[in-house]
Amino acid sequence: MQSNFLIAKDSSSAMTLSENSPEPAAAHASTTEDFAHNLASIKARIEAAAHKAGRDPASIRLLPVSKTVPEDRLRLAVAAGMDFLGENKVQEAARKAENLSDIPGLRFSVIGNLQTNKAKFVAQFADEFQALDNLRQAAALQRRLEAEDRQLDVFVQVNTSDEESKFGLPPEEVQEFVEQLPQFDRLHVKGLMTLALFSENKEAVRACFVRLRELRDALRTSAPEGMKIEELSMGMSGDFELAIEEGATVVRVGQGIFGARALPDSHYWPGFAGEKSSAPKPAAE
Ligand SMILES: *Cc1c(COP(=O)(O)O)cnc(C)c1O
């Protein structure tokens, strides 16, 4: 189940991969070569996990998650081949999109919770929004997208962990929710997104991924006409191989590419209590 595929030659920047628990964070990347190296090792792990699961690696998109990474380092990441970046916080993402607007073809996906009053930022710069979970938000995005004359790919966020999280719809409410979405013609529904339980218990994490897949499978037949819910955005640095095993089509990997973050995950997912942090204690940036 866990890949022990080891591609790194240079132990100073290599991810430590033991068979049972790979360190989720890469060493701090600070040159284009570091980024290319980290990117290649994550891609190799995606490929190995896909083959193991009998899946085509090309059916899995790696979304590098660049939150907290400043613009100067992002330029190096782009030079290493990253052209679609995931950001958790809207204002941080808007600032980066603005400061990096000279880079042709660079796109942003907003993957974190969005307050309705910030929908206008997403409408201005984002190509994708992965945390759609209420109708007021959908209406605000639609209105702002019309004003900007833009379109947006969206994923519906689902709470698959039964945590008292404020974010994501309970699985049983997703069907009714997606039935409301065709009225928002600027939003193109692509699939479902989830944050799995933070737990050392692999089977508990896997159950979250299975739940999202089963929900997607059910929606394939019951979604409104013309809506194709195919994508499954699930899996992060600590659990993407498991997610691939369960059908992920998008994996969101931050620390495995950029290195550990200084701030704990609770900063990004308020109210999302976990049994453990997804990252080891970070080295100071
Ligand atoms: C930060 C973040 C990730 C990536 O987490 P890593 O542990 O850095 O891989 C994935 N999804 C969301 C929603 C995030 O905010």
Image (cartoon, grey):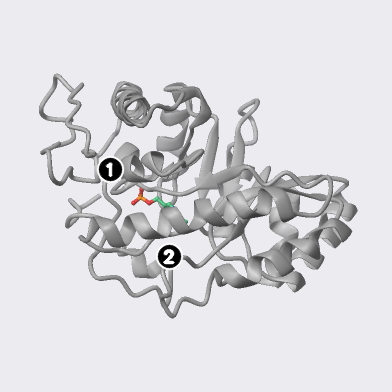
Q: Nearer the viewer, residue 1 or 71?
A: 1
Q: From the image, which quarter does the N terminus lie in? A: top left
Vertical side of 143 occupied by 21: above or below: above
Residue underneath mark 1: 259
Q: Which kind of residue does numbered mark 2 sit on? A: Tyr
Q: Nearer the viewer, residue 60 or 215?
A: 215
Q: Secondary structure at mark 1?
A: loop
Residue underneath mark 2: 268
Is the C-beta of the residue carrying label 1 under 8 Å from the nearest atom of ligand 1? no
Asked if residue 271 lies left or right of residue 278, the reply is right
Q: Residue at x 18, y 42 (%)?
A: 22
**Residue 216 percent location from the top left of the image:** 59, 51
Quadrant of the rendered structure where residue 178 is? bottom right
Is the C-beta of the residue carrying label 2 under 8 Å from the nearest atom of ligand 1? yes
Q: Which kind of residue does numbered mark 1 sit on? A: Gly
Asked if residue 203 lies left or right of residue 132, the reply is left
Residue 194 visible in the picture? no
Residue 152 visible in the picture? yes
Asked if residue 44 lies left or right of residue 130, the reply is left
- Cα distance between the residues tagged 1 and 2: 16 Å
Task: Name the disc covering residue 147, or none.
Answer: none
Vertical side of 186 occupied by 106: above or below: above
Q: Residue at x 41, y 52 (%)?
A: 68
Vertical side of 228 occupied by 130: above or below: below
Q: How many marks?
A: 2
Q: Residue at x 74, y 54 (%)?
A: 223
**Residue 209 percent location from the top left of the image:** 42, 54
